[in-house]
Amino acid sequence: MDDPSALKIDVIAAVVRRDGKFLACQRPPEKRHGNLWEFPGGKLEPGETLLAAAQRELDEELTLRVIEIGEIRFKSQDPGSNFVVNFVDVVADGVPEAIEHTRVDWFTANELLALQLAPSDRQFAEFLVRDNLYG
């Protein structure tokens, strides 16, 4: 029988970009990776698509309306967990509100690297800058 702790859990990280800046959110202190910054998103529910997860998570966490999603730009295994984080381009409408986060703000790719990012988000930000992904 398979070890349930080895099962991977897909997570969406929404890469929302406006005017050359990316949306990042600071996690509450009591959560895993507390006080660290991340791209918004969360765990996919069983049978849920990336689009449905983005729509649900961004509405719940930030009151944003997802218009469309693009491709998976980067995947990362979150260190110390069974989460596989899928960084996906997302076009969203509205002004983000910090409902489940301490703060939300917009940053250039280089500014992201100056933040204390969650481990997978740091890997993506480094990839973003190194490969000039949105140049």
Image (cartoon, rainbow, N blue to C red):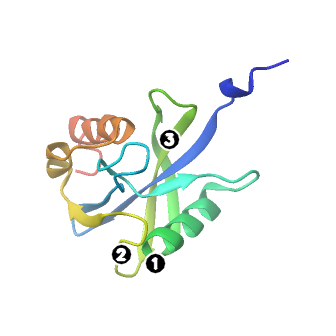
Residue drawn at x 55%, y 46% is 11
Residue 57 location, quadrant: bottom right
Q: How many neighbours does mark 1 have within 10 angstroms: few (below 14), some (14-19), or many (20 or more)?
A: some
Q: Amino acid at mark 2?
A: Pro
- Pointer 3 or 1: first along the chain: 1
Assign a secondary structure to mark 1.
loop
Instruction: Identify which residue, 73 or 43, lies in the foreground.
Output: 43
Would residue 57 be seen by someone viewing this image from the given angle? yes
Q: Which residue is mark 3?
A: 85
Marks 1 and 2 close (CB-CB < 8 Å): yes
How far apart are labels 2 and 3 at the CA level?
Answer: 21 Å
Q: Which residue is mark 1?
A: 63
| Residue 80 screen position, x and y as percent | 48, 27
Q: Which mark is residue 131?
A: none
Instruction: Identify which residue, 103 or 92, lies in the foreground.
Output: 103
| Residue 76 screen position, x and y as percent | 46, 33
Residue 15 location, quadrant: bottom left
Q: How many neighbours does mark 2 have within 10 angstroms: few (below 14), some (14-19), or many (20 or more)?
A: many
How far apart are labels 3 and 1 at the CA level?
Answer: 22 Å
- Pointer 2 or 3: first along the chain: 3
Instruction: Identify which residue, 99 or 38, lies in the foreground.
Output: 99
Residue 130 location, quadrant: top left
- Pointer 1 or 2: first along the chain: 1
Q: Amino acid at mark 3?
A: Val
Marks 3 and 1 close (CB-CB < 8 Å): no
| Residue 62 screen position, x and y as percent | 43, 72
Left or right of residue 52, residue 66 in this image: left
Q: Which mark is residue 96?
A: 2
Residue drawn at x 75%, y 51% is 46
Quadrant for the N terminus, please: top right
Instruction: Decide: is 45 above or below 85.
Output: below
Q: Amino acid at mark 1?
A: Thr
